[in-house]
Amino acid sequence: MRRFTFGLTLGALIALQTSFAMAQEEGVEDPDAVDAPAPDDGAVADEGAESGDEVAPEGVDDTPPPPPPPVEPVEPVEEVAPVEPPVEEVPEAPEAEEEEDSSWPFNLTASLGTRYEAREQYDQIGRADSDMVRFRARVGIITDKLDLSDDIAVLMRFVPQATGAWMLAGLSDPALGLHIGALEIFTGPMRLEVGRFEMSYGDELLVGTVNWHPVGRSFDGTRLRWSLGEGGAFADAFFTVTQEGSPVTNFGNGDTYFTGLYAGLGPMLAEGLALDVYSLALVSMASTDPMAGTPLDPSGRVTLGARYKQKFGMIDARAEAGIQVGSQTSNQSIMAYQADGELGLSLFGGGFRLSVEGFIASGNDPDDAGTNGAWNHLFPTAHKWLGFADVIGFGGGLNGRGRSNVAGGVLHLTGKLFQGFGLYAHGHIFSRLQDVLITDAMGMTTRTTAGMAGAELDIGAKWTIAPGLNSRLGYALFMPNENYYGTSTPAHFLEIELHFTY
């Protein structure tokens, strides 16, 4: 049985080997042997020897196929380091031509406000009671600087406005006026303004914009500013016309001019220091009384003064003083003075401020016909300093109106409760330095007595709703002295305002 099995096995092997040899002779490759190494014939012989089987019978060719030709060794190829391709030099791109600036060459400004005002018991102190809603609609255009040459540039300001009170229900509009209309010429450190423009100097005790008033103040004329360094120091020279006399028989007849020099020198001396000096002149040319037809003498008033303001940590101080000289008429000279000072203390990190102020402005002695001693406050923002009720600060600044023939003191308290919301309280006392002769419309003259004129309390709140959008609520109580006004009945003033500035 084992011999029979061995015979079958041996026959199968011989047949397989014979088939393989024939396939080699015919050039047919075993599809399963593609890319595979040749079979190891020694493995087959060893396998047979291990089993101890007999050699194949005669007649069967069991000669193994010849070995494959030897493979010639392949010489190793020396590895050559890859050569990096040369970097092509890319020519620099030509600089792009500057595109023409297509931005809008104008800047817009706006001041839009509405305020409710109510006055009661003013008729007891020579004024009128009223309640009204006043408004301002002011929108302006300011151009960018336009270079005319290497050293000359111009800028234009055009700011029209309409103001008034709520009273229209028909087919009419308030008149549109020109608040600012000026050409500014720049060359080096100098700037020349020509036309209508605003002027504000120092704390506006003498020259201010009266921004509280719906109309505000501007001047017609020209002003030259010389910038003194980068710190903000400057020197101004201006000439304005405040009244144009018409009709005229002689050149300048009836005109009034306001001109002067004003210099802010503080930044040249110390950082944070305000030190101003000025010389201002108010000149009225000869004219004719329009009612009587009699000639009126020319007058000239020169104001010489200085201003100081500085902060030292928690303490701040300011002071301003001046004198006025000139001639009121051909027979009356001018000799007047004023002084104003304030000392403040900031508390709780600057959130609250407490200050004390004192002021004096000379008045005219009605018994001295040769000298006019009344201080003329010129063109100030009197409302800012002499009480929001506008009792003392109201009217022109001559002997008992505005900052003239008055002395007093103020206690100021301001505080910020949170971001954008603050409170204020100001307590004033006022006194008159000289008696005042007052002539009414009927030609009757009365004489008021020098002394205590009254007291005033101003309280209110300010709220910045958003940048540029502000609201204000204010109340003022003026308590007149009966010896001066003939009554002790208090006068009340209330204001509620919403204002947008851009």
Image (cartoon, rainbow, N blue to C red):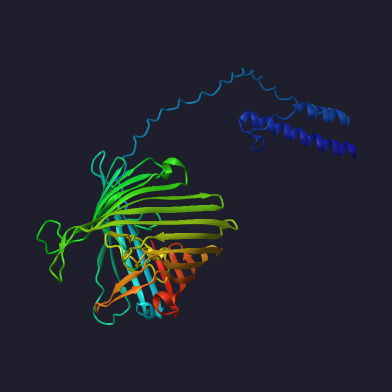
User: How many numbered badges does the structure rendering display?
Assistant: 0
Image location of residue 441, percent across then percent down: 25, 77
Whether residue 363 sits left or right of residue 458 in the image: it is left
Give the position of the N terminus as an image quadrant: top right
Residue at x 45% of width, y 62% of height? 467
Residue at x 43% of width, y 43% of height? 267
Res. 55 visible in picture: yes
Residue at x 46% of width, y 53% of height? 318
- Image quadrant where residue 478 sits: bottom left
Is 495 situated above or below 15? below
- Image quadrant where residue 64 sits: top right
Q: Tell which residue pokes out farthest to the bottom in this image.
A: 169
Of residues 352 and 38, the one nearer the viewer is 352
Of residues 83 and 421, the one nearer the viewer is 421
Res. 104 visible in picture: no
Image location of residue 36, percent across then percent down: 67, 32
Of residues 339 and 129, the one nearer the viewer is 339
Whether residue 295 sits left or right of residue 436 in the image: it is left
- Image quadrant where residue 354 sits: bottom right
Image location of residue 124, percent across then percent down: 38, 80
Is 381 situated above or below 92? below
Image location of residue 408, percent across then percent down: 45, 64
